Image (cartoon, grey):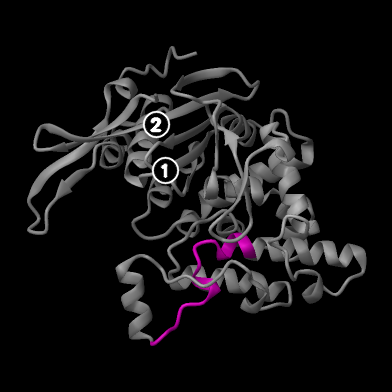
């Protein structure tokens, strides 16, 4: 059984808990710290979008289409579907000579009330560009167009069905995922992700290894290491694109810049690269609760990343968020449980 990582308080009493597991690995693959079962395969979901975006840079598509930092960042995103996100994803498709009809991620209404109100006021209907994965899929389409050109195929025709595991594009994405995690995907559990691409079960330790490699470039071919660095830097320069208003990923990376690359995944998954330390982090909350995953990730960032006084104070909003009722009265909060609080970033190995 995995340990409790996060406590939920009502007043000063623990009302609920979130158990889970995490692994922190360095660029050599050595385990720095861990709790819980880090060998059980889990579906990382959207937490690995930066790994899935590596072919966008490696293939030459990013250079040929002159993609901006914002466009590279949204290729790694699970965004709010705000107007800036929609426009950026559409801009990528236009550079590739296509439109929103090329996306195979499905239509999704944004989840944030403020975004929905804005759409209703503009009398907008939801479409695939509003899907939180539209930037990732726009990146996929750009890579597919690059592959089509190399093969002398017509891009619009070649891109059809790109979400299927047997499509050349998805084979490229799978190869990048397998190489960075040192995982044989042919032997891994497989399912279908929310955006219709294949998702593979990978242990937390292997996911942490991949993110340590993204942080350091160790264990990666030179071109892949450059691609990982370019994507990390793009997200640091355009953090709004990776999430949006009120999102943990955007707010933490806006605060800490290139010192932290972090990415949420569905069902309580979080992954991060800590370049200064050369570490990769992967965690999963057992009950799939995002609030637990955010508190756990914030606590790990506080433990392992060097922070100034103002930065540490700002991080408290994420590691110990306050809960208020509908009258605005403080009724409790969340905090890292004893297992997380006992970690020592200076000595953990």
Q: Decide which of 66, 80 is in the foreground and name it.
A: 80
Question: In this image, 110 relative to 333: left or right?
Answer: right
- At label 2, counting other C-alpha atoms closer than 10 Å, the crowd grade (few under 14, some 14-19, many 20 or more) is many
Q: Quadrant of the N terminus?
A: top left
Give the x, y percent position of residue 118: 34, 78
Q: Decide which of 188, 28 is in the foreground and name it.
A: 188
Q: Mark 1 and 2 residues: CB-CB less than 8 Å, in contact? A: yes
Look at 56% across and 65% down and name the residue there.
134
Give the x, y percent position of residue 294: 36, 41
Mark linked to residue 288: none
Residue 133 is inside the magenta segment: yes
Q: Residue furthest right?
A: 152
Residue 206 shows in the view = yes
Question: Helix, strand or loop at disc 2?
Answer: strand
Residue 339 vertical position relative to residue 50 in the rendered view, above or below = above
- Counting the numbered discs, the total is 2
Question: In this image, 74 relative to 33: left or right?
Answer: right
What residue does disc 2 label?
A: 20
- In this picture, which residue range is highlighted in magenta? 123-137
Give the x, y percent position of residue 191: 60, 49
Residue 345 vertical position relative to residue 294 in the rendered view, above or below = above
What residue does disc 1 label?
A: 268
Give the x, y percent position of residue 142: 72, 65
Residue 320 is inside the magenta segment: no
Residue 225 shows in the view = no
Look at 44% across and 36% down and name the residue there.
284
Question: In this image, 135 relative to 311: left or right?
Answer: right
Q: Decide which of 150, 230 is in the foreground and name it.
A: 150
Look at 64% across and 66% down and name the residue there.
138
């Amino acid at each position: 059984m995995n340990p409790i990582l996060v406590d939920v308080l009502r007043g000063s009493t623990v009302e609920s808990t979130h158990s889970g597991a995490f692994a922190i690995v360095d660029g050599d693959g050595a385990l720095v710290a861990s709790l819980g079962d880090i060998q059980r395969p889990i579906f990382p979901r959207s937490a690995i979008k930066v790994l899935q975006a590596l072919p966008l840079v490696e293939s030459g598509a990013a250079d040929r289409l002159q993609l901006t930092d914002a466009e590279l960042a949204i290729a790694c995103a699970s965004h709010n579907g705000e107007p800036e996100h929609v426009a950026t994803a559409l801009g990528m498709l236009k550079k590739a000579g296509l439109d929103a009809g090329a996306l195979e991620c499905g239509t999704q209404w944004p989840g944030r009330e403020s975004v929905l109100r804005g759409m209703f006021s503009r009398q907008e209907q939801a479409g695939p560009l509003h899907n939180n994965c539209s930037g990732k899929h726009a990146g996929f389409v750009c890579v597919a167009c690059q592959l089509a050109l190399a093969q002398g195929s017509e891009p619009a025709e070649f891109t059809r069905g790109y979400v299927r595991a047997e499509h050349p594009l998805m084979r490229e994405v799978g190869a990048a995922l397998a190489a960075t995690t040192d995982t044989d995907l042919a032997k891994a559990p497989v399912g279908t992700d929310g955006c219709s691409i294949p998702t593979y079960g990978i242990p937390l330790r292997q996911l942490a290894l991949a993110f340590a490699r993204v942080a350091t470039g160790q264990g990666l071919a030179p071109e892949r290491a450059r691609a990982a660095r370019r994507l990390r830097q793009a997200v640091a320069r355009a953090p709004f694109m990776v999430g949006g208003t009120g999102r943990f990923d955007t707010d933490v990376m806006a605060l800490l810049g290139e010192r932290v690359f972090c990415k949420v995944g569905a069902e309580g998954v979080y992954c991060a690269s800590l370049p200064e330390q050369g570490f990769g982090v992967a965690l999963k909350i057992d009950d799939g609760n995002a609030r637990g995953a955010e508190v756990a990730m914030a606590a790990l960032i506080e433990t392992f990343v060097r922070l100034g006084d103002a930065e540490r104070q700002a991080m408290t909003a994420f590691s110990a968020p306050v809960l208020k009722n509908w009258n605005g009265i403080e009724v409790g909060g969340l905090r890292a449980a004893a297992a997380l609080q006992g970690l020592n970033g200076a000595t953990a190995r």
